[in-house]
Image (cartoon, rainbow, N blue to C red):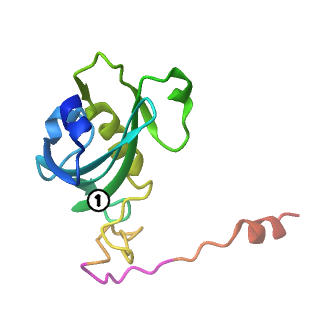
Amino acid sequence: MKIFRTDLHIGLNNKLFEISSGSLGLDKVSFSEDKITCTIHSEQAPNGYYLKGLMTVSIRESCDRCLIDFNSKQKIEFSILLTSDVKLIKNDEHDVIFFTDQDDAIEIDPVLAEYILLDRPLKKLCTEDCKGLCTSCGCNKNEIDCDCKQETQSSSREVLKNIN
């Protein structure tokens, strides 16, 4: 997605953009919708501009407990500093893109792709109370109550107590 200097100079006031998920180059992420909506607000900053916004992304995930596929809708906030000041490149509050006075436009897709990757949860669950799969028969315990007897495994301390 290109942001033009003229738009930045005038100011973006919660302007709505639509981005194709294919344009982000995230081949390992399965999007459930091709369209990503993005609202951006811009402010002038010393030697550049601040971009602040919110993306709405729909991703197809596989549950880590029961292995079913589900759609996850995420709202991701972002903050980007566009600047020609080399000293501000190591800014901790914002992602920084080098943007000189000679540049007419800036491509922010790579930074937005990073935000999507960083926002993905480590543990992907279809629901908070997902019961997962039976360790004996493999059925989905969210759908079926199986008759398998679950052996409770003794803790590692119990095993150590039995060593002679």
Is the residue 115 above or below the residue 54 in the image? above
Task: Say which of 7 and 37 sits in front.
Answer: 7
Left or right position of 154 against 7: right
**The N terminus: image quadrant:** top left
* Residue 28 pos. (x, y %): 27, 37
- Range of the magenta residues? 143-150
Q: Residue at x 60, y 72 (%)?
A: 153
**Hey, what amino acid is under mark 1?**
Gln
Left or right position of 159 against 95: right
Give the residue number, with chain letter if any, for mark 1: 74
Query: Does residue 16 appear in the picture of this structure?
Result: yes
* Residue 93 pos. (x, y %): 52, 44
Circle 1 SS class:
strand
* Residue 34 pos. (x, y %): 11, 46
Q: Residues within 10 Å of mark 1 (few under 14, many from 20)?
A: some
Task: Say which of 140 and 154 sits in front.
Answer: 140
Is the residue 154 above or below the residue 11 in the image? below
Q: Residue at x 47, y 41 (%)?
A: 94
**The C terminus: image quadrant:** bottom right
Task: Say which of 135 and 88 sits in front.
Answer: 88
Residue lying at the far right of the rendered structure: 164
Q: Main secondary structure of the magenta part?
A: loop
* Residue 86 pos. (x, y %): 51, 21
Query: Does residue 69 appear in the picture of this structure?
Result: no
Q: Residue at x 38, y 78 (%)?
A: 129
